[in-house]
Image: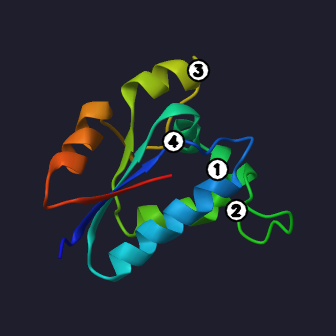
Amino acid sequence: MSDRLAILICTASVERPALYSTPLVHALAAHALDAEVEIHLAGPAVRLLVDGLADSLYPTPAQEKSIGDFLREVIAEEIPLFACGMARTGWIADGETLIPQARAAGATAFIARTLDPAWRTLVY
C-alpha cells in the first residue's frame, strides 16, 4: 500500500467554492492516516492561493466554515501547496500575491507523481 498521495485541484473556482472543500478535507484525512500528502492547484483553482481570497469563499450557503478555514488547517499540518506556473500566469492578476506557503510546480511535477508507483493521485 502506498502512503503517498498527490491531489490535483483543477475544477474548483471562486465561482464554485464548494468544489474546494472535499479535496482539502481528503488531504487532511490522508495526513491524519500518516500519509505524505501534497496538493497541486491548476487552472482557475489556483486562485485559492491568492492571499486573503479563501476567507471570502464558503462551501455551503450557511457559511459555517470558510474555505480559508480549511486552507489554514492544511497549512497547519504542513501539507505542501503547489501552484501551477501556467495557471498563475493565466489566473493571477498583476498586483495579486499568493500566500507565503504557496510553492511552484508545473504539470510535469503532478504527472510524475501519477507515473510513480509509490504515489497515489486524486483529481478534483
Q: Nearer the viewer, residue 87 or 103?
A: 87
Residue type for callout 4:
Cys
Residue, disc 4: 10
Q: Earlier in the sequence, mark 3 or mark 1?
A: 1
Helix, strand or loop at mark 2 = loop
Alpha-carbon distance for marks 1 and 4? 16 Å
Q: Position of residue 7 (x, y in %)?
A: 38, 55
Helix, strand or loop at mark 4 = loop
In the drawing, what numbered circle is on residue 54?
1
Residue type for callout 1:
Ala
* Residue 37, quarter of picture: bottom left
Residue, disc 3: 95
Tell which tag, 3 or 4, sits nearer the viewer.
4
* Residue 85, quarter of picture: top left
- The residue carrying pointer 1 sits among few (fewer than 14), some (14 to 19) or many (20 or more) residues within 10 Å by Cα, namely many
Helix, strand or loop at mark 1 = helix
Residue, disc 2: 66
Q: Residue at x 47, y 19 (%)?
A: 89
Q: Residue at x 86, y 63 (%)?
A: 61
Q: Is residue 14 visible?
A: yes
- The residue carrying pointer 3 sits among few (fewer than 14), some (14 to 19) or many (20 or more) residues within 10 Å by Cα, namely few
Residues at badges 1 and 2 in contact (C-beta under 8 Å)? Answer: yes
Residue type for callout 2:
Ser
Q: Position of residue 59 (x, y in %)?
A: 72, 61
Tell which tag, 4 or 2, sits nearer the viewer.
4
Residue type for callout 3:
Gly
Tell which tag, 3 or 1, sits nearer the viewer.
1
